[in-house]
Amino acid sequence: MHDEHAIPNPDESATPDDSADGTSRRAVLRTAGIAGAGLGLGALTGGTAHADAPQGAPAAAATAAEAPPRKGKTMVGVPFERRSTVRVGIVGLGNRGGSMIDLFLAIPGVKVVALCDPVKDKTAAAAKKVTAAGQPAPATYTKGDHDFENLCKRGDIDFVYVATPWDWHFDMAKTAMLNGKHVGVECPVALQLDQLWELVDLSERTRRHCMQLENCCYGKNEMRVLRMAHAGKFGDLLHGAGAYNHDLRGLMFDPDYYEGPWRRLWHTRLRGDLYPNHGFGPVSNYMDINRGDRVTHISSFGTPALGLAEYRKAHMPAGDPSWKETYIESDRTISLVQTAKGRVIRLEHDVSTPHPYSRINSLGGTKGVFEDYPERIYLEPDHTNDEWGDFGKYAEEFDHWLWKEHANPPGGHGGMDYIMIFRLMQTMQLGLVPDFDVYDAAVWTSPVPLSHLSIKAKGAPQAIPDFTRGMWKKARPGVDSEKPQA
Ligand SMILES: NC(=O)c1ccc[n+]([C@@H]2O[C@H](COP(=O)([O-])OP(=O)(O)OC[C@H]3O[C@@H](n4cnc5c(N)ncnc54)[C@H](O)[C@@H]3O)[C@@H](O)[C@H]2O)c1
């Protein structure tokens, strides 16, 4: 299985390059993608990137901290309709969608009824998985970049899962909701602040949930820390940190890993934190962001962008299309976020220099601190002599019920993908309130445009809007769920 969090196995990375009609879609994207053709980039980015005025930068007006008037009713605490079977449509069947489908198929009461990807081979391979799991052959949508609209129009889908390049996330989430579907989107849910507001407004207006499927919130360590934080083991919470520090240089330049150069191209457009969710989501949960506290502003600083150009020089042959690209994305972005209660969250993003994988994942309070990668803990009164303690000691008392019930979950990323999908499908089947909603999606993604603006303004703080429009003050459950009654 392809696993972005693991060192890629070159054999596993190799996927067929040719579409059914004999034309290589990858080959087309490799060249045309630079100008955004075929990826829908035009609408988001305008034209060619320039180091001092990157296209795709959010409009200044969109940074206003004040929430626009609400057009619908809040989605805070809104349960799903109860349904014994959840009917799923999947858009994007690349590395991520093509492996997450296995998890949907592994959950009783979940039916995969429709699939969409313009690459016919990938759609066919995914359809085969559905029939191999004993389900009827799914409807397939392979007729170009907008065929997802036809999938969204179907009357027999409850939930649309979007695992496409970032360029498409906003359009797809929007289209799903406008067609009456709940939608779960890979990270980040959108790239611009006005788009985040639009998704909030649409979710409220259509009464459909729009969710960021942030799998790291369901990591075993993250869920244990979450339960310990809520049990008061850290005392009053003061600070936390999260990151996406993952050397993706090899994958981003590998012509066969992603479907076209879409991910690398974002490094020509924005300077800030392109992928904050994996770190921000879990720390937001520890601190009950949107559930008693809220994030108010962010200051970001970025290093020079040298890593990708250096890698290209060492590895890419003359004439490769990547030689036309100018990288502006900071190799390491470091952001500080403050909350209404005065807590501080540090975020890091670095996918273009050599280093071992780390999401940092730390939390500190008046009684001590946890740090991950590698995991270690120091809490009074358990530890007193300046030496880190054993985090495993807290497993029995504090592991989340989901991890106790699914000790060896299937799928990648240590099982957190399965735990997330299992729980999401459970909330849909039982008619419960989802663990996370459009407000969480908007907050966890907001550093993408705001870190870019802050770096351009030499670290000047940027207001993070209150997407909940005041509802953040209300304590309510989230990922730290109680096991539902059968
Ligand atoms: N949460 C995680 O741990 C995790 C891990 C890996 C990837 N991701 C996310 O998943 C998403 C996909 O990443 P990937 O690695 O699978 O990329 P990929 O390039 O392998 O796959 C993307 C797929 O989307 C398809 N696609 C492109 N435009 C489309 C359109 N208009 N309609 C339908 N399908 C379209 C492509 O043909 C391709 O098959 C990204 O948002 C990425 O950030 C998340």
Image: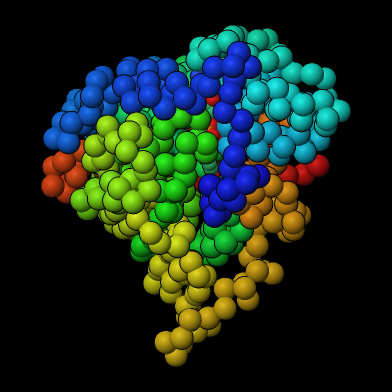
Q: Nearer the viewer, residue 292 or 369?
A: 369
Q: Nearer the viewer, residue 254 or 132?
A: 254
In which quadrant is the C terminus drawn? top right
Please name the residue shown 41% across and 31% down the image. Answer: 262
Residue 209 percent across, percent down from the top left: 54, 27
Residue 334 percent across, percent down from the top left: 28, 54
Q: How many marks?
A: 0
The reply to whether residue 471 is in sight is: no
Please name the residue shown 22% across and 29% down the image. Answer: 49
Residue 16 percent across, percent down from the top left: 61, 30
Q: Is residue 192 left or right of residue 13?
A: left
Res 109 quadrant in image: top right
Q: Is residue 248 above or below residue 425?
A: below
Please name the residue shown 13% across and 42% down the image. Answer: 457
Q: Is residue 346 above or below residue 85?
A: below
The reply to whether residue 104 is in sight is: yes
